[in-house]
Amino acid sequence: MNRQTRLPLGCALVWLAAVTGHVFAQGPVPRPKFGSYIPPAASATGHYGILGEVAKPGVYSAEGPEVTLQELIQQAGGMSANGSPAIRLVRQNRIAQGRYFNPAGRDPLLPGDIVLVENLYPQAAGAQAVSIGLIGVMDRPVVVPMRADNAQIGTVMLALGQSSELARSVQLIVPSRQRPPTSASAPLANGTVLILDPKLLVAGNLPSFPEAIPMTRVAEPSMTQAATPAPIGVPQPALSQLPPSIPDNRLPVTNAARNNGEVEATMLPFSNGSQRPQANTASLPAPGSRLQPVPAKPVEKPKKSTVPLLNADSEIVSSVDDLDLGTEDEPAIEAAAPAGFSFWQMLGIGGTVASLVGLAVLSRNVIGKDSPSIRTTMMDDDVVPESIRKRSAMPAPQMLQKHRRFDLPEPTLSAKRPRIQPKPIAETQRAEVASAQQTEPHDLAELLAMRGPIETESVVLPHGLKLRRAPLSSTPFYRIDDAAELPGAPHERPTTAATPQRSLDDAATMKVPAPHFSTAIAAADGPAMESAIPEMTGGKAIERALHQLLRGKLS
Amino acid sequence: MSIGLDLGSTQFRSLRRHGQRLVGRNCPCAFAMIADTATNRRMIERDDLPFLELDRELVLIGDAAIAWSDHAPVAVRALLPDGKLPADDGLARELLAFLIDAVLPPATFPRETCAMTIPGELFSDDSGIERDYFTQLVKQRGYEPVIIGQGMAAVLAELGDAGFSGIGISLGASQCEFALVHCGAEQARCSIPWGASDIADHDTAENDQIITDFLVELLIEAGMRISLHDGFRVVSRPVSIVCSGGLAQRADFEQHLQMAWQRAAWPIPVRALRVAPDAMYTIARGCLIQAKLELQATALRAA
């Protein structure tokens, strides 16, 4: 082995050693693991929170496939006199589609939903007890009753055993008619939901929360009677029995006191008034932080009354030109300017652009009068500028004398221009237009002016038509090889030996072998089987064919 | 010829122009099933009611079902409960096809324009089964369907003197829709799945207060969404508003709306508020105008 062959061999050995060492250093290659995903067993018990203007706010638990909004409100004792029928749902930590409460309706809820029944007249409401919803502290929603003057974010954080700094990460869902709190010491309205981040909570400090109230379902609930809101203006007895005032040194009023001793929820161990913490203004969140509520602020009433007169024809502009919407000078629908970008700044940019354009035009008119782009003659300076010729060491070519003119041919218009042929219109399109023009002119104004009575034609519905279809309450059709509907024989084994077909003439008299998937039916082949399965007259064609197969006869 | 088709949750209506007249067709979207007995057949033949036979029952559709239920204890069922097409009800689909054929005359030429609304559609780009189903039915009648919203149809029908600009409110049976329209083009839409059917079963004595409360809640809900919507947010000048729908057909609707407007805060300055005078065919009329506009655009493109 000479030296020339030894070098590549050595390199190959070194590479092989490096690769082998790298492979061994990595250890055994992990085999792919295959497994079946087993979803966690769904809890059979669902929890539903309800708070706000109901008699018994709290968290209710129910076992069953479906709990409706009407059932939950009925369990909560019905809405109070000031309860708004516009129900808001908090689903998966956000405001879901609102429902308009219909006592006779059926609006299904999902486990974990929180129902907010808002107050129609929040300004007039002087409730001493409020219910606050908490999300994120447990695996289910929590509703706690609180005294109104004690319901503050800082107080709630203290009662939960958490730091007051956690108030920064709290998201609020405030009733739509209430103003969102601007500080940690601002009172929370009845029906406010606090969404906490479970990762930031110190689980060991959390107090014990009230147990969920099991829902009692009745066979025939008198939902309409129980859940119908009380007449407006008539306070409900449960709420009207509240004491007029509550001293500060007393613990907050519990639901037990409000509902004849029935305990629905346990109060959080809030401190009394002397131990009430004061919110530190230095730790208050800045505007725009997450303390701001999730939905937008409730719309404030305009200072100036914008209630227009109904059918105020005089205020409707008479023509499009008089319309403020979309006029040229000040369009009513205009693009929103970015924040902090004033009109004068925009004008400055526009002025700058205008001045640049003006300078360009001026330079073109004054300086570049003989611009090559608009001349039909060309100077030699245009070909090689003077500066370049001075810098170049090469002598200037003789043909490029200064101000030597050579004419360019004048552009001449060709005598025969190619004519632009219009695009051929499709025959169908032409027919459409022609037919449309024949049937009625395009007089939109005339149509708009037609304010006469509309003649109503009678509709012609089919009469005496026979529908061959299953009725509305049709029974579900299952696969015929469904295991639950079949005898135990394996479906691949023929249950009856098929008689070989001898000739075409015998085919009509031969019996079709029994279905291979039905042992019992095949065993009962013959008249007994025919009597066992009645003849099917209705249904679809495929159903009749399958039925005929079951009966073992040709149709 | 073009036609407007208003497919609501409880009523199907069509409107077309015939010379100097406006001709409409209307049919309730409901049916009833009665037993196929000799007595019932004799009564049906006496009143000359159209019926269908289904196994051992008779099916009455539309006005016939309502007329029968007025005299006999027969429940009238909605073909589109909550504006939704029943997915597993083949009979309802077949009856809906009969209703479409009844209110929609055959097209006079291929691909005639038919502007229509879709029941229960919350979004303008909603590709639900309702849109697919009704579009196919309209195409089978020879039309080229053009789908618009109910709020936009209300603006087209009633705010023509305002340049087809403003906000249209459609108070339907299963949903209410607010649409911001500018120069005949829909800029934004806000649909709320609350309908007048939610408040129809209440006692008559409290009905006035309930209707006002419903309107207040509806305006507050819509105001909240409108204040968050980019399309509505750019409105800086007062706009005109028109109300239409089944609830607007009440004689005292203006008073209810006036009271509700005073209680609800509205984020958009309003120039004027109108109630459609002919609320029954307002949406269909707007659809017809939209079909005209589409026809004009087609003619311009072809030229």
Image (cartoon, helix red, strand yellow):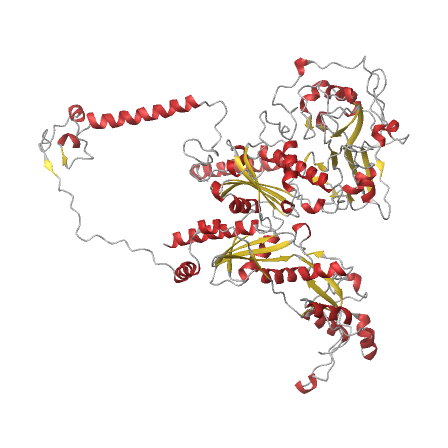
**B125, A45: nearer the viewer:** B125
Q: Position of residue A554 (x, y in %)?
A: 71, 78
Q: In the figure, is residue B251 to the left or right of A477?
A: left
At horizontal 23% and vertical 53% (from top left) the residue drawn is: A418
Task: Examine the rendered structure and indicate whether residue B53 appears above or below residue A206.
Answer: below
Q: Position of residue B254 (x, y in %)?
A: 63, 40
**B75, A427: nearer the viewer:** B75
**How many marks do you count on the picture?**
0
Residue A140 in view of the camera: no
Q: Position of residue B214 (x, y in %)?
A: 69, 39
Task: Examine the rendered structure and indicate whether residue A199 appears above or below residue A545.
Answer: above
**A199, A176: nearer the viewer:** A176
**B265, A288: nearer the viewer:** B265
Instruction: State which quadrant residue B295 falls in.
Output: bottom left
Task: Examine the rendered structure and indicate whether residue A232 appears above or below residue B91.
Answer: above
At horizontal 90% and vertical 30% (from top left) the residue drawn is: A260
Query: Which quadrant of the rendered structure holds the C terminus of chain A?
Result: bottom right
Residue A192 in view of the camera: yes
User: In the current view of this chain or complex, which residue is farthest to the bottom?
Assistant: A505
At horizontal 85% and vertical 44% (from top left) the residue drawn is: A217
Q: Position of residue A101 (x, y in %)?
A: 73, 41
Instruction: State which quadrant residue A112 falls in.
Output: top right
Task: Examine the rendered structure and indicate whether residue B131 appears above or below residue A542.
Answer: above
